[in-house]
Every structure is written in C-alpha cells, then in structure tokens.
Image (cartoon, helix red, strand yellow):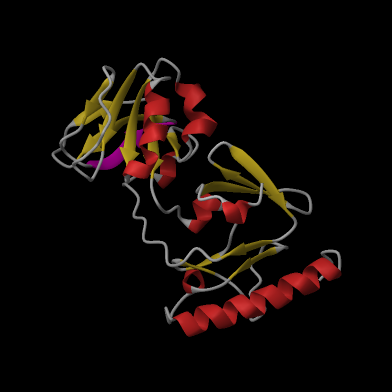
Amino acid sequence: MDLSLTDAMVTNILPMDGSFQLLAENEIYEARTLLLAIGAVAAKGFIGEQDFLGRGVSYCATCDGFLYKGNTIAVYCQDTHFEHEAEYLAGLAGKVYLYTPYADCGMDLPNVERLARPIKEVIGGMKMTAIRLTDGTELAADGLFCLRNAVAPTVLLPGLSMDGPHIAVNRRAETNLPGCYAAGDCTGRPYQITKAVGEGNVAAHSILEYLSSDGKK
C-alpha cells in the first residue's frame, strides 16, 4: 500500500539498518528515505508524560493495548477520529477512564467511565501508577493512552536532534539521522508557505542525491 493514499496517522518511526519502518495504525511501511513535513506541532503533553513514555504512557492502541489486558487504563481521546481505538482498548482493559475534550462522544460501554475533569499529570515511580486530574483527584491506572492529532517529533522518531521545539536541519534539509530529512514549519520560523515550498524542493533534491549515491552522501 502506498502510504500517500491512506489517512492513517503515523505514530512511530523506527530507524533500521539503511531504512525506516513507519507504524500507521495496524500497518507497517518501510522506506529508504524519510521526509518529515509535519508542520508546527502544537501538541502539549501532560506533566510527567514524557517521563513515563514506555513505562505506562503510549500513543498507539494497536501496538501496546494487549499489554494492559484486564488492567485499568486511562485514555485521552482528542478527536472522534480516534474513538475506534478507544473502543479497541476498552475491549482489552478491565476498566477505562476516558477523557475527551469534546462533548459528543459516542462511546457507551460498561467498563468505560467518562471523566468530567481534564487529565493534568501522570504520576508513579519506576512505572506510572496513576493520573491526576485538574481538580486534584488521583485515579489509579496501569497505563495512559494519548490519542492525539499530533505527536511530538522526538516521540515520533527517537534520536532526532531538535533546535528548541523545531527539528534541527542543515542547508540540505538533512537531520542528524542519515536518510531522514525535514522541511516546512517543523524546521522553524518563519511559518510561511513560500519557505515550506522552498525547503521541500531542497529536500527533494537532497533525497534524490542520497538515493543515487546508495546512501553514502
């Protein structure tokens, strides 16, 4: 399947030996080169979210949901587009604490408890043990699934060098990872179409050179 023909959100990218594996929902794609044109990511995480990544916090229901079979989990569902993933998790977990920032949630399952207050913080020790809501309430949970429309670049692709909130690139649009390029708002200001188009053109030429040299540039 051509990834450009699907609207599945890429939630994780793994650098392999001379290629990249991209996880989009329950599909895996492989590519020799990668161009990140993800815009200015405005996803703001919860307090402690990054600290417990891989130790209770996850961004992919189909990847990690089975690890919490019969357990208690929390789910942050940012958009109705992700409700099918939340329902999938509810089919695995014993209990689900669900928070949605929108009112018209269509989920009505016996083991799902809707939260009236937003999630503020992830807490725990070696692994997460609970979430804290904005009113101070603590709810014991073995995991937290964050189903958002955007994923921070360093979460999407571990090992990627950043310049503040932006992806660090050189004048050839190269990142610190061989074969990985970035262009557009994700590389910094100004956030303008003309800048994004120009950087995309530079990145395309750099990618062609990289592929023609068999990755030796």
Q: Residue at x 34, y 34 (%)?
A: 75
Q: Residue at x 57, y 83 (%)?
A: 198
Q: Residue at x 43, y 82 (%)?
A: 190
* Rendered position, 179 above or below 171: above
Where residue 71 sits, quadrant-wise, is top left
User: Left of 67 or right of it: where is 181?
Assistant: right
User: Left of 140 or right of it: where is 189?
Assistant: right
The residue nearer to you, when weighing 194 against 36, is 194
- The quadrant the C terminus occupies is bottom right
The residue nearer to you, when weighing 87 against 48, is 87
Q: Main secondary structure of the magenta part?
A: strand
User: Left of 4 or right of it: where is 7?
Assistant: left
Q: Position of residue 64 (x, y in %)?
A: 51, 30
* Rendered position, 68 above or below 76: above
Q: Which region shows up in magenta?
A: 119-126
Q: Position of residue 113 (x, y in %)?
A: 23, 25
Magenta stretch: residue 80 in it? no
The residue nearer to you, when weighing 165 against 184, is 184
The residue nearer to you, when weighing 3 against 153, is 3
